[in-house]
Image (spheres, rainbow, N blue to C red):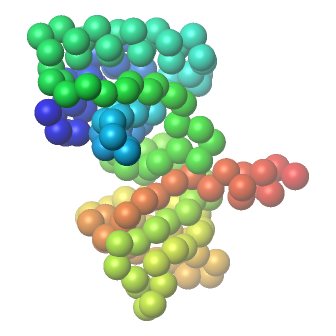
Amino acid sequence: MDAKEIEALLTPLIEQEGGELVDLQWRKEGPQWVLRLFLDKPNGITLDDCAYFSDRVGATLDEGDKITKSYVLEVSSPGLDRVIKKDQDFERFAGKPVKLRLKLPDNGQRRFTGVLKGLADGKVSIQVEKDLKAFSRENIDELRLDDSAAFEMEG
């Protein structure tokens, strides 16, 4: 199974249990495979929630040997600097400070920080100081909430 197949299998289970699959990583780390799930719930996710989802996900994957190779399952919170990748995330987090890393540079620059404005026509808009910039979604390597800016804004 690849990451997209695992995500398609697990998303309904997680949503049925009141959770949201924020991100999924399926990769080989050293000699072992690691399946890392970042989950959230409307009021946040607790350690008990992570343990519960770990049991449910593990049982689902073990049923019928969905993943044939040996792996380690990790379930955790997305953290304050959660990744933004789903369509609904762009609307939900509009107006929040973000950090952006591009695959290919834009005018020689790959990293930007600013305020997320939204997603339209496959382009992500970010207010970078006085400039409103639009980045092709395909060129985005990673987009995360900027938790350090949140603390600066609160303080």
Single out the residue that lies furthest toward the front.
Answer: 31
Q: Residue at x 31, y 64 (%)?
A: 137
Image height check: is 58 above or below 74? above
Give the percent coordinates (x, y) of residue 43.
59, 22
Can residue 51 be seen here? yes
Give the percent coordinates (x, y) of residue 108.
45, 90
Q: Residue at x 80, y 57 (%)?
A: 152
Which quarter of the image is occupied by the N terminus? Answer: top left
Tell me where residue 141 sits by quadrant.
bottom left
Q: Residue at x 40, y 31 (%)?
A: 37
Give the percent coordinates (x, y) of residue 5.
16, 33
Image height check: is 66 above or below 83? above
In front of the other: 102 or 75: 75
Q: Is residue 77 left or right of residue 118?
A: right
Image height check: is 2 above or below 119? above
In front of the other: 32 or 115: 32
Q: Is residue 108 left or right of residue 61?
A: right
Q: Residue at x 38, y 25 (%)?
A: 73
Give the percent coordinates (x, y) of residue 27.
31, 43
Can residue 20 be seen here? no
- The number of callouts visible is 0
In front of the other: 55 or 14: 55
In front of the other: 144 or 153: 144
Q: Is residue 154 left or right of residue 150?
A: right
Tell me where residue 45 sits by quadrant.
top right
